Amino acid sequence: MTETTRTVLLVILVAFIALAGGRDILRRERGKKPGLFRLTTAVYLALGLLLGEQGSGLLDAEMLDNLEPVLELALGWTGLLFGLQLEIRRLRKFPLNFFGITLFQSLATTLLVAAFLYVALGLLLRQEGNDLWQALMLLALVGAVSSPAETALAAAAGGGVKRRLARLAHYVTSLDPLLPVLLFSLMTGFYHSDAGGRLIPALEWTAASALIGLVLGLMFNSYARHRHGENELSMMIIAFTIFAGGIAAYLKLSCLFICVVMGAAIANLLPTSERIFRMLVFREKPILIVFLVLVGASWTPAGGSGPGTVVWVLLCYLAVRVLGKVAFMALARIYLGKDLEPGGWTVGFSLLGQGGMSVALVVNYQLLFGGVSSFVVVSVALLAVVASEAFGAYTARFALASEGVDKE
């Protein structure tokens, strides 16, 4: 069998897995409330491990290199979907202090996780220099990201919820990735080969990434404002995301950030952007499944450090992340008293979920950086996503469940 034939057959296999998973073969009974416990990410990561070099070897390193455009497509899709939520008219419907508290707890959690893990990674990995700092920043940024899926599940699980608190939690979790994605782009510019670890070139590269995303958004708007069918729009979305990924790969910039800016430009310029958003959401699950399978295939769970190191760093990471989210959202009561009062100090437990954006940051990191530390931090980040998906909806339910209070 030639390499080309093998590649085509594996692409067909991965596509079949995506379509099968996207149709929910194990669909729950109609009318039954959604369960809070989920292991979707774990299942597809495990399937990727089985297909990768750690398992059968079907998706080896060379094959994964050939499939890199698929990863870029998934990255761009994730970024575009998030960017489309940044419509100014929609955000104005919420109090401005919601946005302020989102940025506050996100930045504070990033700094807290970075400070604690600097000691843990330095002692356990005995690494120094750029490799350590890049790994450290990845975990700090992923730790700041929350997912709205868990808050939505908690609200849909039945029983009363604190409506004002749930509204705030959903807002915060929806916009939580904004600052981490921006800081990741800044880190990409800082460690760019032409920046030399200097701040001004890092800012210039970040501005260049934003400009590329804006230009792509304007181009997309000029095409999409005319009447198109769904299939035409789908092909247009795929073309623009792959194009953005190619530019990012060539210039060694963050594809995720470029596509977030492109999505934000589309959301604020294109009157039919809501239609684009619905199409992306409708087709998101197969894309995410392919994403997870390819990530799992390239994953080396322990690397050369052994499972003990991964477990210790993971425990430190989870403990500090929970502490940061809970503590800093508790502080928010000072500024958002009437919105947070029903939840008290527990409101931070609604922010512990993580999802596709966390995995996207991990993949973007793998495409741009590497080093000895990457084996450990990638394992920690992925295992944390699995844990948060499994238990994040329970903690969100704990924070949002109503006990006869604030059912308005």
Image (tube, grey):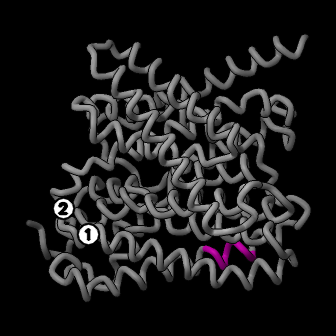
Q: Residue at x 74, y 82 (%)?
A: 120
Toward the viewer: 182 or 328? Answer: 182
Point out residue 268 in the picture as x, y percentages from the top left corner.
27, 41
Identify whether 126 is placed above or below 72: below
Q: Amino acid at mark 1?
A: Phe
Q: Name the chief secondary structure element in magenta.
A: helix
Toward the viewer: 9 or 77? Answer: 77
Q: Quadrant of residue 112?
A: bottom right
Q: Mark 2 = which residue?
A: 94
Q: Residues within 10 Å of mark 2 (few under 14, many from 20)?
A: few
Pointer 1 and pointer 2: residues touching (CB < 8 Å)? yes
Which residue range is magenta in the image?
Answer: 312-317
Q: Quadrant of residue 310?
A: bottom right
Q: Residue at x 40, y 37 (%)?
A: 28
Q: Residue at x 91, y 62 (%)?
A: 304
Q: Mark 1 = which residue?
A: 98
> Quick one: quadrant of the N terminus?
top right
Point out residue 259 in the picture as x, y percentages from the top left corner.
49, 41
Point out residue 108 in the picture as x, y percentages from the top left corner.
47, 79
Q: Is residue 356 visible?
A: no
Identify whether 313 is placed above or below 163: below
Point out residue 150 in the picture as x, y percentages from the top left corner.
40, 57
Q: Amino acid at mark 2?
A: Phe
Q: Is residue 225 visible?
A: yes
Q: Residues within 10 Å of mark 1 (few under 14, many from 20)?
A: many
